[in-house]
Amino acid sequence: MTYSETLQYLYAQTPMFQQKGTSAYKEGLENTFFLDEYFEHPHRNYKTIHVAGTNGKGSTSHLLASILQCAGYKVGLYTSPHLKDFRERIRVNGVMISEQRVVDFVAQNKEMIEKRYLSFFELTTALAFLYFFEEKVDVAIIEAGLGGRLDCTNIIQPELSIITNVSFDHVSILGDTLEKIAKEKSGIIKKNIPVLIGECKDENIKNIFIEKAKENDAPICFAQNYEYLEIPCELKGIYQEKNKHTVMVAFTLLLQLGFNLADSDLRNGFQQVIERTGLQGRWQEISSQPRIVCDTGHNEAGISEVVKQLGEEKYEKLRIVFGMVNDKDISSVLSILPKNAIYYFTKAQIPRALSEVEIQQKAKKYNLNGESFSSVKQALDKAKEDASSNDLIFVGGSNFVIAEIILKKNDKKVAQ
């Protein structure tokens, strides 16, 4: 099979949450333990850092990877979802896994894949763990996919666990209260392994983490108890200050754990994170006249940070190209969007996408007005046509909307 045929096979053979939503989610770790034994526990051969949380996991993971790369470590990075190419999920020192390695993995394990009902994420995680072993990485940053307790990344025994924050997302799976969601996230806290909590203002949530850490004799600290230092960073957006703060504290903890790091690695890692890791979609400017910015914030907490950022920007008119998927709480998001913007409601070309007409109708209840478009390209083209050079066009609401307009960068960063 070609690479394209291999991906189509995987999408057809294994249910993919990114495409199908909750119907693709499988509770339990039976398959994960099976795959781990089948591939002879590859993740035990290198150090890992586990990153969970509702928002900021991706930025935090990429910043850590960049810092460790600056320090001379060979770093695996496993994140999700991808924007343009499946291989974005699996990188070593910023270089995506090769198409051929993905093809070979499926070809070599096709019989096993077809015998078991595996989810896309279960199989992808197994591939990542195996690939990092084959590439002889020193350390791998592993981003949890969904939740923590029953996430298939949760079989690792990391050097450090990080929970960035807790807010509402995937409530049909993780629970409909912050306390329930926090308990799921706290599932990555393990015996004697230090855990860092990035942002936690709620005392009830804080106590959930403290109790879980106490049960496991796991040293726990909260980033908010540490002083924040202003360090320049390639990642823009005021919400990145929280992620940067978390990573600064993680840097200190990794030093205590024996990692060979210098202050210059922290600074260089922040300033070179996009170049070193290929991260995209975080308050990313994709055009200057008119100015077009996109961001992957996709739930109430994430969008609220985007709205704060929009409030800091200067423009003549604000134009928003906006789409969401059908398993998010759209009403809570619409209620906080700027009323003074001109909207271009749209949908990504995936089964989970919410109809642009439905979004438009719901938006009217919150005094958000604009036209609807059946494709992201049509919506963005119209926004650009309408805009003056001093206008700001923001594109967001869903990773999948961003994926359809973002340029494919770092193509040179592909394993041969």
Image (spheres, grey):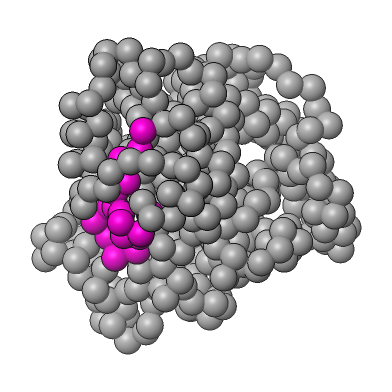
Question: Can you say which quadrant of the picture contains the C terminus?
Answer: top left
Question: Magenta includes 351?
Answer: yes
Question: Magenta includes 58?
Answer: no
Q: Viewed as shown, does residue 127 lie left or right of 86?
A: right
Confirm whether residue 32 shows in the render.
Answer: yes
Question: Can you say which quadrant of the picture contains the N terminus?
Answer: bottom left
Q: Quadrant of residue 91?
A: top left
> Residue drawn 28% across and 43% down?
371
Residue placed furthest toward the left: 2
Q: Quadrant of residue 320?
A: top left
Q: Please, is residue 395 above or below residue 350 in the view? A: above
Q: Please, is residue 156 above or below residue 341 in the view? A: below
> Residue drawn 66% across and 66% down?
176
Residue 139 lies, in percent from the top left, at 53, 43
Q: Viewed as shown, does residue 239 lie left or right of 395?
A: right
Residue 25 lies, in percent from the top left, at 46, 73
> Residue drawn 59% across and 65% down?
171
> Residue drawn 46% across and 64% down?
327
Relative to the observer, which residue lies in front, 250 or 257? 250
| Magenta region | 342-359
Q: How many marks?
A: 0
Confirm whether residue 142 shows in the render.
Answer: no
